[in-house]
Amino acid sequence: MLPLTITVTTLAELPAAAVQLQGVIAESGCSVVAFEGEMGAGKTTLIRALADALGVVDDVSSPTFALVNEYRDDHNQPVYHFDFYRIDSVEEAQRMGAAEYLDSGYLCLVEWPACVAALLPEPRLGVRLNVLGTETRQIELRIIN
């Protein structure tokens, strides 16, 4: 199963990649998914497609300033979406209750996980987006222990 690489050459292929990612998340048993990639690689865009695959009907946007957005999937279960790009310290993340979210057992989608690596549980699913062209992305999936 893992590691696995998915290549997306156009945005039109993203929904199929998101469905594949949804399956990997389910098979992995990991509730924390860490999204890595350079600025503009498409982390939030992939998360938006994944949320669609999960049945989220809310508007999915980057929680850059709020740090966390909560959505509901098609089973009315919470899905937490974090963006730690602007976090100043692990202590700041702890004060906002990040550890409780991450340990909740509910799906947590984490952008910029390196900023709070000390708080992230293991095992977790790592998703790295590599930019290969204007719309082409290589999505690498692996378990992080």
Image (cartoon, helix red, strand yellow):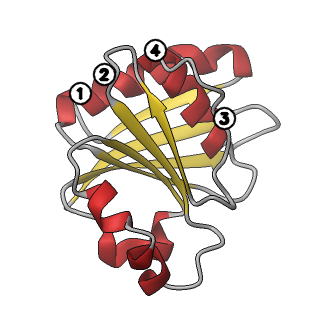
Q: Earlier in the sequence, mark 3 or mark 1?
A: 1
Q: Position of residue 88 (x, y in %)?
A: 59, 84
Q: Is residue 22 left or right of residue 26?
A: right
Which of labels 1 and 4 is toward the front? 4
Q: Amino acid at mark 4?
A: Gly
Quadrant where the N terminus lies? top left
Image marks 1 and 2: residues in contact by CB distance under 8 Å: yes
Q: Earlier in the sequence, mark 4 or mark 2?
A: 2
Q: Position of residue 12 (x, y in %)?
A: 70, 14
In the foreground, 59 or 40: 59
Q: Which mark is residue 26?
A: 1
Q: Earlier in the sequence, mark 1 or mark 4?
A: 1
Q: Amino acid at mark 3?
A: Thr
Alpha carbon separation for disc pair 2 and 3: 18 Å
Q: Which mark is residue 45?
A: 3
Q: Which mark is residue 23?
A: 2
* Residue drawn at the location 77% of the way across and 31% of the way down: 135
Residue that numbered label 4 is attached to = 55
* Residue drawn at the location 60% of the way across and 30% of the way down: 48
Provide the secondary structure element on which disc 2 rests: helix
